[in-house]
Amino acid sequence: MSPDTALAPDSLREPGAAAMAQCLAVQERTRPRSAWARLVGRSPVCEDALPWYVGAVAEREVAARLRRLGPDWVSAAGVRLDTHAPPVELVLVGPGGVYTVTTKFLQDARVRVGSLRLLVDGTRMPYVRAAREEAARIRSVLSAPPPLPRSGHPAPPAPAVAVTPLIVVVGARRVELVDPPRDVVVLRDRALTRWLRRRPRILEGVARAIVVDRLAAAASAPLVLSGRGAAKTETDLTRPPDVVAFAALRRQVRNAAAVRGLWLALFILVAAAVLGLGALHIEGLLGFTG
């Protein structure tokens, strides 16, 4: 990355940042759990915050999968290209090309993907259209004339490369690809990295660096690229407060689930003991009467 697009430590953008912020804002207005609720393992996430919570978790888990791709792949989360449109959830650049990644948490849903529509439990959702729009915005940045850098020397144009929108489905019971669209890829999260590794290598070395520079220069705020090959900065140690708070909330959710698991195990043990004593009692009665 060139000096013109140097990144500041305070510009950190985390995957799922918007969903985390919404979740924590709602949680702040929620009463803390009572002692009884903590004892029985009730989740600390309130009903209104739950969609934001699971959405943030899904985005962060997908981003964690992408980090396993290795140093040739870099990603940028929350890419805001202008103030009039929401940020692009995640942009991925690697040997296999340029991708926009949209994560959808669809717990236990049945997803049916056709060329003209995507159905979630029979309801048509605008996910494909929205994914196309995100990819088009990134494509327009890469195809536009390069801005004049501070040095005054013309910047090299971005290589002609397609921008492919990906819709990554998390938690669905079933994903059925009936007649999937050719320009939008829909796949499960567990298949994501395998699918990307199998893409033909079309973007290497200098060409990939130019694409990364163009995306960073076009963003209305600095980007932080994450990946094993990205340079380490102080941002690795200084996390935004919302990330810290969300991590604490996730620990509370895990602890609550563990408490419920202990209660369930205890119930099973007690039930087994009662049934065992009952069986012995019945055998004793049968022996007595025999």
Image: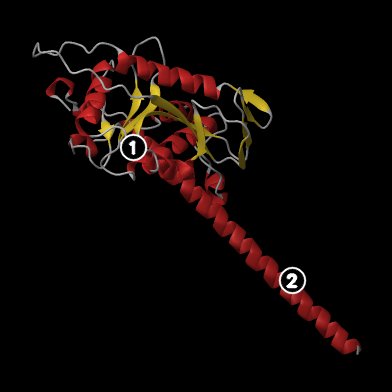
Q: In this view, does 106 lie above or below 135?
A: below
Q: Along the line of sight, which residue is nearer the eye, 105 or 147?
A: 147
Where is residue 244 shown, x and y percent of the image? Answer: 33, 37
Q: Is residue 199 above or below residue 142?
A: below
Q: In the image, is 19 to the left or to the right of 147?
A: right
Where is residue 192 shown, x and y percent of the image? Answer: 44, 41
Q: In the image, is 192 to the left or to the right of 139?
A: right
Q: Which mark is residue 72?
A: none
Coloring scheme used:
secondary structure
Marks 2/1: CA–CA distance? 47 Å
Q: Which quadrant holds the N terminus?
A: top left
Residue at position x 86%, y 83% in the image? 285
Q: In the image, is 226 to the left or to the right of 271?
A: left
Q: Is residue 40 above or below residue 214?
A: below
Q: Which quadrant holds the C terminus?
A: bottom right
Q: Which class describes the residues within 10 Å of circle 1: few (<14), some (14-19), or many (20+)?
A: few
Q: Along the line of sight, which residue is nearer the eye, 189 or 59?
A: 189
Where is residue 253 shown, x and y percent of the image? Answer: 48, 44
Residue at position x 18%, y 36% in the image? 234
Q: Which class describes the residues within 10 Å of circle 2: few (<14), some (14-19), or many (20+)?
A: few
The answer to whether one can see residue 239 in this image is yes
The answer to whether one can see residue 249 in this image is no
Q: Which mark is residue 244?
A: 1
Q: Earlier in the sequence, mark 2 or mark 1?
A: 1
- The residue at the far left in this view is 151
Q: Is mark 1 on a helix, strand or loop?
A: helix
Name the amino acid, label 1. Answer: Val
Name the amino acid, label 2. Answer: Leu
- The answer to whether mark 2 and mark 1 are in CB contact below 8 A is no
Q: Which mark is residue 275?
A: 2
